[in-house]
Image (cartoon, rainbow, N blue to C red):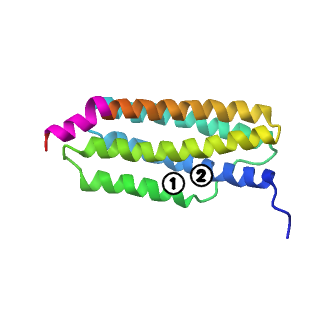
Amino acid sequence: MAEKTLEILFHETLKDIYYAERKILKALPKMARGAQSPELKAAFEKHRDETEGQIERLQQVFELIGKRPQGKTCAAIEGILEEGEEILEEFKGQPALDAGLVAAAQAVEHYEIARYGTLKRWAQVLGMKDAVKLLDATLKEESMTDDSLSALADQVANQKALKAA
């Protein structure tokens, strides 16, 4: 059996987040259509555009390590996205729908932040300066998206859900 190195772990985790980003890209239009507030719809549409750029950055990282871009099934993102689907179905037309969608989107963001943070650290340890820059750019975008989702929750979604109670 071949030795499992940090480089191999880096590549496997890169495949995991590549798969996740592509699944997220497919899920965002459905979340945007399901959102009730125009602000949340716009946030999902903006994140869809950002996700396309993040996928391109991941493809560049694959290129830097001499591997072809390839995903590996990520059970974690499958479960997180499934929970988002459940919220869309169970809360459709209800005052708490947007609050639930924000929470589901933040679960996605927190997963991405964890993955990108780890990949960035490993790239630093492995001396992959160009990969560090690409991963850091995405990590910053994911953190900003999380912050803007928190603001949307506070200013719009949670208040709407609360007033209806």
- Whichever of labels 2 and 1 marks the residue nearer the N terminus, that label is 2
Q: Residue furthest left?
A: 164
Q: Is residue 117 left or right of residue 91?
A: right
Position above or below: 118 against 74: above
At a point 81% along the width and 42% down the height, the residue shown is: 126
Residue 151 point in image, percent of width and height: 36, 29
Question: Can you see residue 74?
Answer: yes
Q: Which corner quadrant holds the N terminus?
A: bottom right
Question: Can you see residue 50?
Answer: no
- The span picked out in magenta is 154-163
Mark count: 2
At a point 74% along the width and 54% down the height, the residue shown is: 9
Given residues 81 and 115, the one toward you in this image is 115
Q: Quadrant of residue 98?
A: top left
Q: Are marks 2 and 1 in contact (CB under 8 Å)?
A: yes
Crowd tier of the residue under label 2, counting other residues whose Cα lies within 10 Å: few below 14, some 14–19, many 20 or above: many
Q: Which residue is mark 2?
A: 19
The residue under label 2 is which amino acid type? Tyr
In the rendered structure, find residue 144 and report the number of the disc placed on it: none
Q: Is residue 130 left or right of residue 21?
A: right
